[in-house]
Image (tube, rainbow, N blue to C red):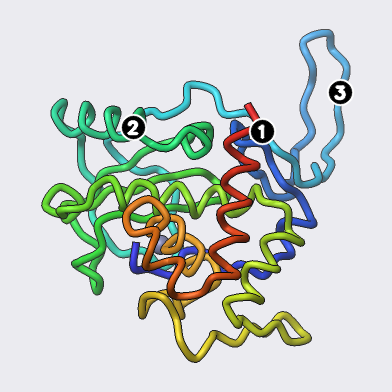
Amino acid sequence: MKWLVVLILLKPFFALACQPNEIHIREQWIEGYTKENGTYVSAHPRSEHCREIRGHRYFQDSNTEEIKGLKTKFKAWTDKEKSLLQTEIENLPNWLKRYKLSKMLRANEEIGNPNNPAMTIPATKTLIIFDKFFSTSKIRGVMVHEIAHIAAWDIDPIILKSFFLARDWKYQEAGKIISPAKTLISDSKLSPSEDFANSVELYYSDRQRLKNFNLKSFQILKEIIKTKESNK
Ligand SMILES: [Zn+2]
């Protein structure tokens, strides 16, 4: 949660917005191969694309992919933990529930950030649950927050940018982003993505505080959620 996941530069939205049930695949190099019917396909680059998630929300007991910048030890899920997670996903607000996760990993703690209950990798729709998650008093808030990081990639970029501008994020040339002097929660300063996830979390736990903090951005967020909720 309190972790810089992916800095939203807004560019990814324009480049390729995947559907809630898809993950983003970067450009990859395909080696030459022979099809079943004998035709040979020579090596070629495959441009970036979206791939549907099959077998969604599945639990993995170990991690096979390297996660940049993350230091932790992965371990197996217990049945009790799995059922808790399943219940929490079922209890998410409807629009967030539509964002399927491609995998859920279980880890001891994030080294260097032991109070972090969970983290998300939006592009691959991976959710990592740390030990701390199970002792936090606001599990629901953590889940809403994490899935909001994924949902941020699927919001109209113009509307999302208006939310960030209302929050006083400054976008400069060459992709430089300046954080606002005053933020909702201190770690909202880390990135627009963090600011957005914290706001969605508060929308469901303390709406009045969110409204009092900044009315304009509250109204934009309310409209974003209303639109997403009505898109069945
Ligand atoms: Zn976060």
Tag in front: 2 or 1? 2
Q: Is mark 2 within 8 Å of ligand 1?
A: no
Where 210 falls versus 167 (above or below)? above
Point out the residue furthest to the top here: 37
Q: Tell me if mark 3 has few (under 14), some (14-19) or many (20+) residues whose alpha carbon lies within 10 angstroms of its own.
A: few
Q: Which mark is residue 91?
A: 2
Tag in front: 3 or 1? 1
Residue that badge 1 annotates: 51
> Mark 2 or mark 3: which comes first in sequence?
3
* Nearer to us in this view, 180 or 51: 180
Q: Quadrant of residue 72?
A: bottom left
> Mark 2 or mark 1: which comes first in sequence?
1
At 25% from the left and 57% from the top, the residue drawn is: 117
- Marks 2/3 in contact by CB < 8 Å: the verdict is no
Residue that badge 3 annotates: 40
Disc 2 from disc 3: Cα separation: 49 Å
User: Which three-letter amino acid code belongs to the residue tagged 2?
Assistant: Asn
At 15% from the left and 47% from the top, the residue drawn is: 134
Disc 2 from disc 1: Cα separation: 26 Å
Residue 230 placed where, x, y %?
A: 63, 33
Q: Is mark 1 within 8 Å of ligand 1?
A: no
Where 159 falls versus 140 (above or below)? below
Residue 208 placement, left or right of 36: left
User: Which three-letter amino acid code belongs to the residue tagged 3?
Assistant: Tyr
Q: Tell me if mark 2 has few (under 14), some (14-19) or many (20+) residues whose alpha carbon lies within 10 angstroms of its own.
A: some
Residue 56 placement, left or right of 171: left
User: Which three-letter amino acid code belongs to the residue tagged 1?
Assistant: Arg
Residue 179 placement, left or right of 166: left
Q: Is mark 3 within 8 Å of ligand 1?
A: no
Image quarter in which the C terminus is found: top right
Residue 192 placed where, x, y %?
A: 55, 71
